[in-house]
Structure formats: structure tokens, C-alpha cells
Amino acid sequence: MALVVQKYGGTSVGDVDRIRNVARRVAKTYDDGNDVVVVVSAMSGETNKLVALANELCDFPSEREYDVLVSTGEQVTIALLSMCLQSMGYKAKSYLGHQIPIFTDSTFSKARIESIDDKNIREDLNNGTIIVVAGFQGIDHDGNLTTLGRGGSDTSAVAVAAALKADVCEIYTDVDGVYTTDPRIVADATKIEKISYDEMLEMASLGAKVLQIRSVEFAKKYGVIVHVRSSFNDNPGTLVTKEDEDMETVLVSGVTYNKDEAKISVMGVPDKPGVAAKLFTPLTTSNITVDMIIQNVSNDGLTDLTFTVPRGDFKKALKAVEETAREIGAAGVRSDENIAKVSIVGVGMRSHSGIASKMFRVLSQEGINIQMISTSEIKVSCVIDAKYTELAIRVLHQAFGLDKKDSKAE
């Protein structure tokens, strides 16, 4: 008997018929002799509706009340799925995050899981009960409801799997695995059968929507095997697991993009110790993640600083930066929301040279200007004008041979 944690996203539980489909899949897993814990998201579109209601009332809603509001979507889904399983003759019980409990810190809307008390779940599993858990939410040590950020149900599922030492965590979504790039942009995109934690971590952080980045961090830290599958067919998906030698033979595993970032430039910054700290501290205090950072060479004691932030935090970040820029005597602030970040990812880059220069050459041949560059051992990212995103993805996907199954880019 295995312990299987399954997670179903909003599209998979988007209406009553799809909830029935999920119930049948869960029941089959249980009938095959497994203990089953199911983690579900809110029904597709529900969280967006709740966020829209909050934004109609005020520009900057209370973060505590925001979490109280948006956490309600999952409550509906776990109740409906549990009812459906019970109507099919199975013992099923729903749990909200605080009923488990899943303890988090107090960073509302971006809370991080600190611990999970698995006692109640284990008792119910021992009684043959299918457990249905609300994803995306937890409780802090002051008793406040918290949410983990968009896509947080993935993190909930992997964290629960880690706490229970599950044999596998199956992430069901509307695609049947991780692809070399977005199939909606490149029809020849191919499914990756197996990908390392590090590659998946980079792809998730760089815009791939299949898995949320923190769920991959959890999986890597606790060695949770993740199987990304479709809830609409029985095709084998993509295994996210430890790196092996075969993975290094492929130079580039995927091409990703992210249109959910904005660029902020602070012009004429005094080039002296402590100024950068003053500029970025208010962003840290506001829990705004800064991604790529570029500082120009100093000229006459002044320099320019450019960085990217999540587009959802753009207004808050811009306001904070403009205030700080005045305090430090900077010349001004410029911003641009019409950018995209395109990236290539692959563990094979560690031992091969020329990958970055090839990427730059391919983009140059298409007349695509590179505004910012960021690299790691296994990725190269470029910020470009958003209007060139699809073109960049297509030419890079082709240039690195990803449109051919089992190909190895030269």
C-alpha cells in the first residue's frame, strides 16, 4: 500500500462535472489499494472574482482581510469533492488549512509554511478515510488565516506529502506534463519525461506555469517525487526528481517566458556605500521580490540602477522607489510595464560553453534588443520588449533543437 498525495488545480475542478471526474480518479487510486490525500484549488476563476471584489472597494485592501476573503474559494471545492466521494460510497473528510493545522509565518498573501501537524490526518487515513485538503492556505501562530500566494496549492500539496512521507505527489493540471516551452506558442513543443529539481526550479521561477516555485523548493529539500499529469487523460506525465547523468546530455531542456514583471530604473543615483541598501530596504519591508538588477558604471559619482519586480507589486514598488529616490537625491525614476523575460534552462549548460552567446546571436538576428541579462549555472535570462516574446520563444526553441524529440542541441 502506498500513500499518494494528489493535487487538482482550478481548471480540474472548474465545474460540477469536472469535480465528478476528479472524484472518480481519486476513487480509482483508493481502490488500487492506496491511502489518498487530495489537495484542491478553488474552482477556476473564483479567486480572480474575489480579488476583483476587493479591488473595487479599495486600492490597497488590508492584507489580513484579503487572506480571509481569498481563502474561501478552496472551502467550496473541498466540501463539494468530499460530498461527491461520499455519494459514491467512500469515506471522505475535508480539512481547511487551520484544521490540520498547517502553521505559517504571518506574511499575509505570501505566507511561508513553517510546520504541519499530521496527527489528525494520519488518524483518519488509518480509518480508511480519503482526506480532502484546502490548498493555498494555513494559519499563523496568532490564529490568523493566511494564504501562500497565487499557485500556493502546489506548495500545500508538496508540503503535505513531505510531512506524511508520501510515496509520490501527483500534481494534476490542464496539461499532461512539463513541455520544452508553451505549446500554445510553439506547436512542436515536446513533453519532458523527467526533469531535475534544479531545472524545474529555474523554469518555475522564470515563468513556467506548470508548478509553483515554492512547491519545487519543498520537493527538492525533502526529496518528494513529483509527477505532473493531466486530470483529463491517463497519459504519463513528467517526473520531477533528483538529477541523473542522462539529464546532463541535453544542453537546453526548455525555453520559458514571463510577462508578469515590470522594470524600474532609478537615474542619477549617488555612487557611494549604503545608497543601494536605502533604495531596496523599503521593497524588502513591503515583501516585494526584486529579480534582475543592473547597475551601470559610475560616471561623475553617479550611476543608474535598473531592476525588475512582479507586475502585481509594480504600483506599490514604484511608489516606494520614488519616495526613496527623492530622499537619496537621485535624478529621477523611469518605469516600463511592457517587458518580458525569456530564458533558456538546462543542467547541461554547466559543462558546455557558448550557450549564452548563441542565445544572444539568435535574438540579434531577429532584431530583438536585449535590455537586461541574468545568468546562473543552468540558465540565461534576457529582458526584451513584450511585443517580441512569441518570436523570441519560437526562434530559441528551434535554435536549440527542442522541436525534435530526443534531440541534443549542439
Image: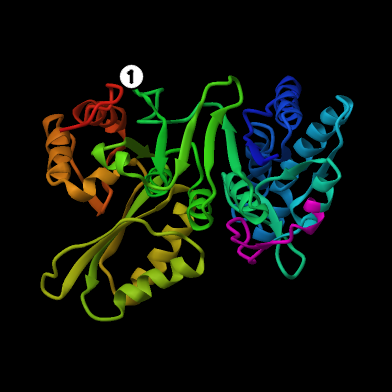
Residue 149 is situated, as x and y percent measured from the top left of the image, at: 58, 51
Residue 189 figure quarter: top left
Residue 115 figure quarter: bottom right
SS at circle 1: loop
Q: Quick one: 210 or 381, which is closer to the camera? A: 210
Against 174, residue 139 (above or below) is: below
Residue 303 is situated, as x and y percent measured from the top left of the image, at: 19, 68
Disc count in the image? 1
Q: Quick one: 66 or 181, which is closer to the camera? A: 181
Amino acid type indicated by mark 1: Asp
> Residue, x 42% and y 31% (percent of image)?
193
Magenta run includes residue 112: yes
Horizontal side of 303 relative to 230 (left or right) equals left
Horizontal side of 290 relative to 393 (left or right) equals right
Residue 307 figure quarter: bottom left
Q: In which quarter of the image is the C terminus?
A: top left
| Residue 110 seen anywhere in this rendered image of the structure | yes
Residue 260 is situated, as x and y percent measured from the top left of the image, at: 42, 43
Q: Quadrant of the N terminus?
A: top right
Residue placed furthest toward the front: 1
> Residue, x 36% and y 30% (percent of image)?
181
Horizontal side of 351 relative to 232 (left or right) equals left
Against 185, residue 146 (above or below) is: below
Residue 46 is situated, as x and y percent measured from the top left of the image, at: 68, 35
Magenta residue span: 103-122
Q: Name the residue under label 1.
A: 188
> Residue, x 62% and y 38% (percent of image)?
48
> Residue, x 44% and y 61% (percent of image)?
319
Is the residue marked by circle 1 packed among few (<14), some (14-19), or many (20+) residues within 10 Å? some
Horizontal side of 178 relative to 339 (left or right) equals right
